[in-house]
Image (spheres, rainbow, N blue to C red):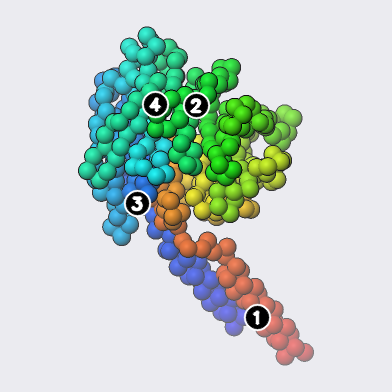
Amino acid sequence: MATCSIIAVLAVFALDSELKMSRTIEKFSTKVDFPVYCTGFTPSGDILLGGGGGSGNTGVKNKLALFKLKIPEKTIEKLTETILSGEEDRPTCIAFHNEENIFSCGINSSEEKIIIGENNNCRIFKYSNEKIELVKTIQTMTSTNVDDYQKVTAFSQDGKLLATGGTDSKLTVLNYPSLRVAFPPVNFNKQEIYDLDFDPTGNQARYELLNDQIIIIHYIIIRECFHEIEKPVFRKSSRCQFRACRFGKGISARFFYTVVNMTSESRTFIVKWDAVTFERISTKVIGKRRITAFTISDNGKFLGFGASDHSIGICDSQTLKVLLHVPKVHGFPPTTIAFSHDSTLFVSGSADNTVHILQLPENFNPGIFQLVLILIGILIAFIAVFYQFNLIE
């Protein structure tokens, strides 16, 4: 009986320690008045949200809104917003400039304009706590298909280049701030561009472009393809698709990462590659549901993801181990995620009008302390049993 009591006390103590650790992770969800399709943090830690009901008379306005986080109150406070045209599409992607208070945003013009080949899809906005205002527009998509849209945008680390890509399979790289074309647009033979990213090292020499079949590493200086990576084959009978890509930063600057969703099975992988040799280093199964959003923290330690089961998660960039998984944070799959610049906050948004904010702990406890306590309890139990038998003899 004494032995059982000792084990019970240790188990309760270990569980209590785990609960205390979980309480250090502050998290909350809140509602906004529009479906959220893109988000990002300003350098000061405010959150920009973009989205809406799209073109047509949906009754839901298209907006770009800036919010201040209030962690203790578990809420967000609207600082300012701009209401966009209801005849045009909602914002689909955003990218912040590293040095100026501006961001690039993908917004389709009206269907009437697109049909005649006039689509000012790439837009530059200036922001402050008081207002968000349009500064420049430029057309990087020439498709007359009203279903095509700008899916991704990114600034280079030094802010001198701006890249856009979308469902029309065309990549455009612009000089900033002139917005003149840096080199002729590249067309990828009707392959939708899912993601793109600039290499943060090497003076912006390379960018990474992804569709569902292949990754293109482009060398900007000589303006030609530098390397191609075909999707990994895990099983001959299994179909895989690339979904997202990111170059490493900080401690992970020597690597880049890709998300691979399996279409024939319920499995999703994150693949870690060498950013110099382009050799695959490691592959990790992340879950059973397709990843819908992916990003990396500025310190390079964390990989964030959103999944089709409405969950979000964070992985270690070195081991690819899932450090945190939060199920059912949204009513629909996450459409957008972002880390704050100090890598302490993680935000996700969804088309169900919800925003989820996660305050990360200083250190992710791997549970070693709890494991040690359990092992000690087992050891004491064995000693007690051994002692009892010795007494009986």
**Amino acid type at image mark 2:** Ala
Circle 1 sits in a helix, a strand or a loop, which is it?
helix
**Amino acid type at image mark 1:** Ile
Inter-mark Cα distance, 3 to 4: 24 Å
Residue at image point 59% right, 36% down: 206
Task: Identify the disc placed on residue 142.
Answer: none
**Amino acid type at image mark 4:** Cys
Task: Identify the disc placed on residue 380.
Answer: 1
Residue at image point 55% right, 52% down: 250
Q: In this picture, is 212 found above or below 286?
A: above
Circle 4 sits in a helix, a strand or a loop, which is it?
strand
Q: Which comes before the other along the chain, label 4 or label 2? A: 4
Residue 262 rendering spot, x and y as whole percentages = 62, 33
**Residue nearer the viewer, 323 or 88:** 88
* Residue located beneath label 3 in the image: 44
Inter-mark Cα distance, 1 to 3: 52 Å
* Residue located beneath label 2 in the image: 182
Looking at the rendered structure, the number of numbered marks drawn on it comes to 4
Residue at image point 52% right, 46% down: 296
- The mark closer to the camera, 2 or 1, is 2
